[in-house]
Image (cartoon, rainbow, N blue to C red):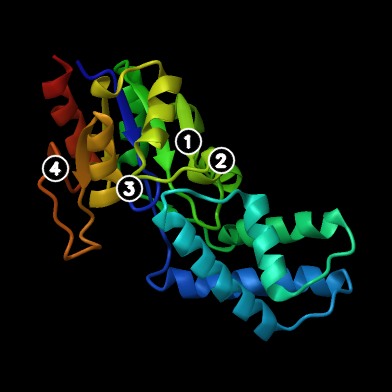
Amino acid sequence: MIRGVTFDWWHTIAETPWLDYDARIREIRIARVHEVLEAAGVATSADALYAAYDRHTDLLKQTWKREIDLTAEEQIDAFVDFAGIHLPDDGIATAITDAFGGAIRAKPPILYPHISEILWRLRREGYRIGLVSNTGRTWGRILRVLQDGFGIETAFHVRVFSDEVRLRKPDPRIFEIAANTLGLAPREIVHIGDDVDADVGGAKDTGMRAVWFNTGLWPDAATDRADAEIHDHAELPEILARWRG
């Protein structure tokens, strides 16, 4: 019997506002960090910060290959080190952290159609609802505030972010954290996500059912492991009802 539903965040509940999101958010982050450093009297250059950012990207990619994540503080420490910057006090590090992670506020993500009403419908129907999200440079502490602003925060019984637990999908342990917090066994949960490896594969390896949210953004993506495939969240309640039994 299915009693819980967990969702991915990016490209499942919310979409980035630009097609060239990575490049544009990179510019915003560097501009915000540069402004913080200038205000604090710390000498640097945009070129040095861009070079540090790209080294930071490489660090994250290598870390993520091991299905682990870095905390916000670990990420900022690495970025500052790559930039060769000496910070005179911890307050500046805090300001850099906010400038880095908070850059998303310049252009917030967009919720997919129907997702808000579906979240609340599933909750009313008695499902335990969770979020299991890999993060990048926009950490859980930032995403929580954004979700609060969308008015969907209380739809979730649990929200699990990779930077906070230092694990990344498809590692089954991040799904297990969500399941344990929901008070359910993995076999009682369906996970919905767009990534055939991180979401579908990770959920199935944990013992959950998996629904592939096929956005069409990845034309070469395919999976034979999903228990169902949807293109719109409005399709989800009927699928879940068949499995509730």
Residue 140 figure quarter:
top right
Say which mark, if any, is on residue 164.
2
Q: Position of residue 139 (x, y in %)?
A: 56, 49
Say which of marks 3 and 2 sits in front: 2
Q: Nearer the viewer, residue 6 or 122?
A: 6
- Mark toward the start of the polypeptide (2 vs 4): 2
- Mark 2–mark 1 distance (CA, rounded to whole Å): 8 Å
Q: In what quadrant of the picture does the N terminus appear?
A: top left
What element does badge 3 sit on? loop
Tag 3 residue: 12
- Mark toward the start of the polypeptide (3 vs 2): 3
What element does badge 4 sit on? loop
Report the number of numbered marks.
4
- Mark 1–mark 4 distance (CA, rounded to whole Å): 23 Å
- Mark 4 crowdedness (10 Å alpha carbons): few <14, some 14-19, many ≥20: some
Q: In what quadrant of the picture does the C terminus appear?
A: top left
